[in-house]
Image (cartoon, helix red, strand yellow):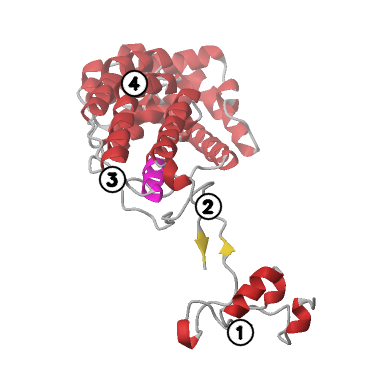
Amino acid sequence: MATLEAKSAYPSHMPGSLAVTTEAVARMMRQWNYREGSGLGGQRQRQGIIAHLEPVALPRRNAGIGHDDTPHDNGLQNTPPVVEDEWSRRWRNLSRVLSLERECFDKTLALLHSLELQGDGSAETAGALAAVVESAKVFEGERTPGTWKASLPPATIRYIVEEVITPRMAADAREWEPLWNPNCQHWLRPWIPLVGHLPDSLYDTSKIINHADHHHIVSSLKKYLHPMQWDAFARRHILPRLARQLRELRITPPKQMDCSFSTVMGWEPLVRAQDMVTILEAEFFHRWEEALLHWLRSARPSLGEAVAWCAGWRNEFTPELLADERVRARLKAGAAMVDRETQGLNRIVGYRV
């Protein structure tokens, strides 16, 4: 029997050649009056396709027909938040600390000079002034954080903090208006390199508590409070409010209209990650899973829409929370639920012409 190539003058390497198939299929195609190189599906005009269908590598494993890469307007983040690289973060923090030390030096020097001009000619003031002037040498070359404070005698630091800076801070704190000066730029921030944190004697909880719902004020105070002060403040005034917001959050697929979850995530850097995870497990994840399951079974969304909805929620979480195994497990459970409820579509292989 003659080979297929011998029966046709049409080049075997061109689209539409019967040389790439079996002899039985080629014979059947000829019986149907197929002419090599002509299209299929075009009926009389033979303007249909010539090349065979190519499988498409879809972005999600086992994604089937109906998968759509078009972003869905689901009221959630379509892209993950940009995370600053570690080197940039460390360099920015180092620059901030060194600049603050220089500011503290300048203000301390000016405050001691003013005391002398006001008639305070005590030996302690004169000795502290001389020591601060001498410490200016550390700013002439490269230095590490804490170098300036280490260059001052301990007795000088104690006198400056207790007798000079603290009274000045107390007077300024009484005039402090948090809404106008949330960063404590004048009365607290410049003295941190010497005092370390807000002195217990100046821990005016009433003024702080009155503004506990202002994120920009509370976030500025965290770096100035002692860790024990801050933990007590967060447990008493921040965590209960976040738990209440999550409890009242309305989860509404396919489009999230209630944006309070993003507000809660904005507070996450201010509290311990394990405390936030505990709140999420108690007030959020079980309701999130119930809403997802109800949506999948009642509305039967497309696979692409369901995956985009879960991905949007994942992008709402901070990197610190995504590093927690419990959070990842609950998000994976949601993705598994999508796979399970849409398994009929998952079995279909997608092709594109």
Numbered mark located on residue 59 in the image: 2
Please name the residue that numbered disc 3 is placed on: 254
Q: Secondary structure at mark 3?
A: loop
Residue 141 position within the rendered picture, expressed as x and y whole percent measured from the top left: 65, 38
- In the rendered image of this protein, does residue 117 appear above or below residue 140? above
Name the residue rendered at 29%, 47% in the picture: 75
Task: Give the mark count.
Answer: 4
Highlighted magenta segment, given as a residue range = 303-312
Please name the residue that numbered disc 1 is placed on: 35
User: Rounded to the nearest whole Å, what is the CA distance between mark 1 and mark 3?
Assistant: 50 Å
Q: Which residue occupies the foreground of this view, 30 or 272?
A: 30
Numbered mark located on residue 279 in the image: 4
What is the three-letter code of the residue carrying label 4?
Answer: Ile
User: Rounded to the nearest whole Å, what is the CA distance between mark 4 and mark 1?
Assistant: 70 Å
Q: Which residue occupies the foreground of this view, 212 or 304?
A: 304
* Nearest-to-viewer mark from 4 and 2: 2
Badge 4: residue crowd in 10 Å (few <14, some 14–19, many ≥20): some
Q: Secondary structure at mark 4?
A: helix
User: Rounded to the nearest whole Å, what is the CA distance between mark 2 and mark 1?
Assistant: 37 Å
| Horizontal side of residue 342 vs 21, given as left or right | left
Numbered mark located on residue 312 in the image: none
Residue 306 shown in magenta: yes
* Nearest-to-viewer mark from 4 and 1: 1
Dominant secondary structure of the residues highlighted in magenta in the image: helix
Q: Which residue occupies the foreground of this view, 70 or 108?
A: 70
